[in-house]
Image: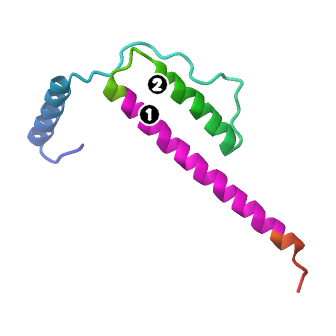
Amino acid sequence: MPYKSQERQRAAKAESARRRRAARVEPSRRPLGPLVSSEVRLATAREVLEVIERELAAVVGDEELGTAERARVVATLCGVALRAIEQADLAGRVEALERALEVRPAA
């Protein structure tokens, strides 16, 4: 978070580090493998949801993740899934409107 005062910025950074140490929440230091194969091409919201479902199962089953880190990742994946669901719903509505307009007689 940018501050005009260097001193306030330094104090905020120190407080953030202190809270992280107090909560013992450290980011995972292990290297991440590829989450999605390079052959996967996501073209629809349904495909995105399928990938998110697989990754969510992997995160929940990972014993090396801490509770806070797991919760953060699950929340992020759920947010992305929600947006994909909304997108799929909107795409369905647009298709229904297009079909209705095609059937409608020209005036």
Q: Which amino acid does label 1 sit on?
A: Val
The answer to whether the residues at label 2 and label 1 have Cβ atoms under 8 Å apart is yes
Kindly report the secondary structure that dominates the magenta region of the rendered protein.
helix
Estimate the x, y position of residue 29 in percent, counting from the top left: 36, 15
Query: Mark 2 highlights which residue?
Result: 60
Q: Nearer the viewer, residue 29 or 60?
A: 60
Query: Magenta part of the protein: which range?
Result: 70-99
Which residue is under mark 1?
74
Q: What element carries label 2?
A: helix
- For the N terminus, the image quarter is top left
Q: Quadrant of the C terminus?
A: bottom right
**Which one is earlier in the sequence, the residue at label 2 or at label 1?**
2
Tell me if residue 91 is in the magenta stretch. Answer: yes
Q: In this view, does 59 lie above or below 29?
A: below
The circle drawn on residue 41 is none
**Image coords of residue 3 (percent x, y):** 18, 46
Q: Alpha-carbon distance for marks 2 and 1?
A: 8 Å
The residue lying at 49 percent from left, 37 percent from top is 77
Q: Is residue 87 left or right of residue 80?
A: right
Element carrying mark 1: helix
Q: Quadrant of residue 15?
A: top left
Q: How is the image coloured?
A: rainbow
Q: Position of residue 81 (x, y in %)?
A: 55, 42
**Vertical comparison of 8 with 58: above or below:** below
Residue 63 in the image: above or below residue 81: above
Where is residue 66? Give x, y as percent. 33, 21
The residue that appears at 33% across and 25% down in the rendered structure is 67
Say which amino acid is labelled 2. Answer: Val
| Residue for point 82% across, 73% down | 101
Residue depth check, mark 2 versus mark 1: number of the one nearer the observer: 2
Magenta run includes residue 63: no
